[in-house]
Structures are given as structure tokens and as C-alpha cells.
Amino acid sequence: MDWLRFFKREQKRSASIAKERLMIAVAHQRSGDANGLRYLPQMREELLAVVRRYVQVPDDAVQFNVARDEGIEVLELNITLPEKQRN
Amino acid sequence: MAKIIVVTSGKGGVGKTTTSASFATGLAARGHKTAVIDFDVGLRNLDLIMGVERRVVFDFVNVINGEATLKQALIKDKQLDTLYILAASQTRDKDALTQEGVERVLNELAQSFEYIICDSPAGIEKGAFMAMYFADEALVVTNPEVSSVRDSDRVLGILSSKSRKSEGGDGKVREHLVLTRYNPARVAKGEMLSVDDVKEILAIPLLGVIPESQSVLTSSNAGVPVIREENSDAGLAYQDLVARFVGEERTHRFLAAPRKGLLGKLFGSQ
Ligand SMILES: Nc1ncnc2c1ncn2[C@@H]1O[C@H](COP(=O)(O)OP(=O)(O)O)[C@@H](O)[C@H]1O
Ligand SMILES: [Mg+2]
């Protein structure tokens, strides 16, 4: 009867392997999707315009970094001010 | 106001047309004036499943091109006077469906129908996109199988970014999961993804689970949507699905394998 149980266990794993693989494939697909982050370039332009109302900065002064951690998306924003404006 | 509902999936052969036919029939049987449109240009099929293939004179593309009026092209169901079918064209011209044309037909339908069901072709090309674009709600038809689930997730991404609703800032397309060809016996053995697995991965509300059923084939042979088969588990599951869609509470049936007697075990088909 042992061999029967062996096959049972193999089959149990079949669906759970499918699930595990899907979770990863889908997470990958979602992060690759332009969906959520489509607005980033536009937002960058607008932020740059706001910063420029106060200080003159080059085009690359506003930098984004998007990180995903345990389902939480973190948008990190860096604005580099020109040398002479600093104390 | 008319509600436009797309039946979509990404992957082909998962049960979109079967679901469109039964869903539209179920809504119409409850007295809601319903039109069901086949968007699968070049591969017309819905007419066969609805049993109206011999009555197709004009199709969707004829209406878009102004070669026929909508009234001429709509086929009235033989049993239900609340149900109308608009057949797909057999043309091989991929660009036959224009966005303006589709919008014009949907707007005209919206004046006299409560529900407009759009049976999407497979893929994420133009036809599928046209079927999705104007939708208020979506039935995402999925089989408990890896490629189907991943394709459904892909389609959900497109629905949330490339639809009239999302582009107009007019809220979000309401999404419903329809899990079809479900085989509880194989789920019990751990061979097939369970309802809960698929729900967890796709993370959208479950509208219905349709069991794998031989009656789907036999009813398609006869050109009768399976929801009309009172003795079929798939038919009953579609009736429950429609009831839930219009707001009734129904517990999910057919999630567990039917228990077989000794003879069933010896001679059962599964
Ligand atoms: N619940 C079901 N049980 C058994 N067979 C099914 C079921 N749903 C669909 N099928 C079969 O699967 C095939 C594809 O169905 P169809 O509705 O045409 O899919 P799609 O429109 O997504 O390509 C058909 O042969 C149909 O009879
Ligand atoms: Mg189809």
C-alpha cells in the first residue's frame, strides 16, 4: 500500500507546484506591466516644473526609484539641488 | 442605463462563448432585454451555440459599414422575446471592427437594451481589445490551469488600464471571476488548482464556478445554451451565476466531487 500513498503525494504536489509557479509568474507580469507606473514620466515632468519655480535645476535633477517589498510599493524621490544653492 | 459586459479571458477555448450564450440567455429569461454580440470576426461561433446559424443574414460588420441597419442584423431568439443575437462577420479583414463603428453600434443598442454582452475572441489583439474597451463590467473566464490563469491576469491588467472607463477617469471596470471546466474530483486529488487557489492569485470576486460537464458538448450539438438544460450541473451552475449577477444570494454548488456508488466507481467516466 505504500506505493499508493507515494502516488497520492506526487499528485498533491502537482496543484501546489502549479500555484507556486503561477504566483511568481503573475507577480513578474504585474511588475512588468506599465499599468501602475504609466504616470511616472508625466509626474516627473510636473515635479521638475514645480522645483524650477524656486531653483534652476538640470533635467536630470528629479530621480525616481520604485521598490517593491512584501506587496508594498515604495516610490523614492530624489531632487538634487545645484551646488551653489547649498550651504 | 444599459450595462455593457465583456466576456473575456486572453486564452482561447476556455469557455467564453459557452458562458456568453448562457449568461445572455439567463438574463433574458429573467425578463431583462439582452443583446449578445459575437466579436470573433472571422471565426463566427456564437450563432451555432445559440442555435440561430441559419437565420444570420447580416452581421456586426455589415452594421458598422452601414450595409444593414442594426434592426435588420439583430436576430431574435425563438423562445425568448427579450433576447437578441448579433453575429460576427466571416470576413478575414482584421480591421473590420473600428473603434468608432463599435461605439456607434453599442450606443444604438444601449437605447433599447438593458444588458449588452460582448463575447470576446481569444488573444489581446484588436478584436479582443474592441470587445473590452467599452465595457462597464467583465466576466473573466478562467480554467483551473496555469496558462489560463496567467492569461486572465494579463487581461485584468489591460482592463484596468486600457478601457473607456479607466481612460476617462470614470472609475474602474467591475471584474468577476468565472471559473469553468472545474473538476472537483481532480481538485480533491491535488491534481488541479482549486477555486481558492485561483481566487488568491487573481484577487477578484468570484461570480461562479462551472463544473466540467458532458452536457456542454451535447447542448452545443443541439444549439441550445446549456443554461436551458434543467438536469445539467453546468446549466444549474450558470443559473446560479446569473442569479448572483443580479444580486441574489446563492451558495456555490458543485465544488465537491459527487459521491459515486460502487457501480459508478467501476464504470464512471471520470
Ligand atoms: N464547463 C464545461 N465542461 C465541458 N466542456 C466545456 C465547458 N465549457 C466549455 N467547454 C468546451 O470547451 C470548448 C471551448 O469552449 P468555448 O466556449 O467555445 O470557448 P472560447 O469561446 O473561450 O474559445 C468547447 O468545445 C466547449 O464545448
Ligand atoms: Mg469563443
Image (spheres, grey):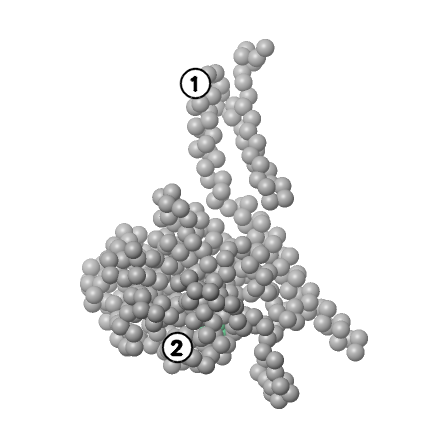
In the drawing, does residue B119 fall left or right of residue A35? Answer: left
Instruction: Please identify the quadrant where the C terminus of chain B is shown.
Output: bottom right
SS at badge 1: loop
What is the chain letter for disc 1?
A
Question: Mark 1 is on which residue type?
Answer: Arg
- The residue at the point 38 percent across, 42 percent down is B169
Disc 1: residue Cβ within 8 A of ligand 1's nearest atom:
no
Please state the horizontal and vertical placement of residue B56, each as a whole percent of the image: 26, 72
Please state the horizontal and vertical placement of residue B243, each as a whole percent of the image: 42, 67
Asked if residue B204 is positioned above or below residue B46 in the image, the reply reads: above
Please state the horizontal and vertical placement of residue A50, each as a whole percent of the image: 44, 23
SS at badge 2: helix
Q: Nearer the viewer, residue B45 or B251?
A: B251
* Label number found at residue B126: none
Q: Residues within 10 Å of mark 1 (few under 14, many from 20)?
A: few
In the drawing, does residue B215 fall left or right of residue B25? Answer: right
Alpha-carbon span between mark 2 and mark 1: 67 Å
Q: Residue furthest right?
A: A2
Asked if residue B263 is positioned above or below residue B69 in the image, the reply reads: below
- The residue at the point 54 percent across, 23 percent down is A79
- The residue at the point 34 percent across, 70 percent down is B30
Q: Nearer the viewer, residue B74 or B173?
A: B173
Question: Mark 2 is on which residue type?
Answer: Arg
Task: Identify residue for label 2.
Answer: B228
* Label number found at residue A53: 1
Residue B180 visible to an observer of this rendering: no
Q: Residue furthest bottom?
A: B263
Q: Nearer the viewer, residue B252 or A54?
A: B252
- The residue at the point 54 percent across, 11 percent down is A84
Q: Quadrant of residue B48?
A: bottom left
What is the chain letter for disc 2?
B
Residue B242 visible to an observer of this rendering: yes
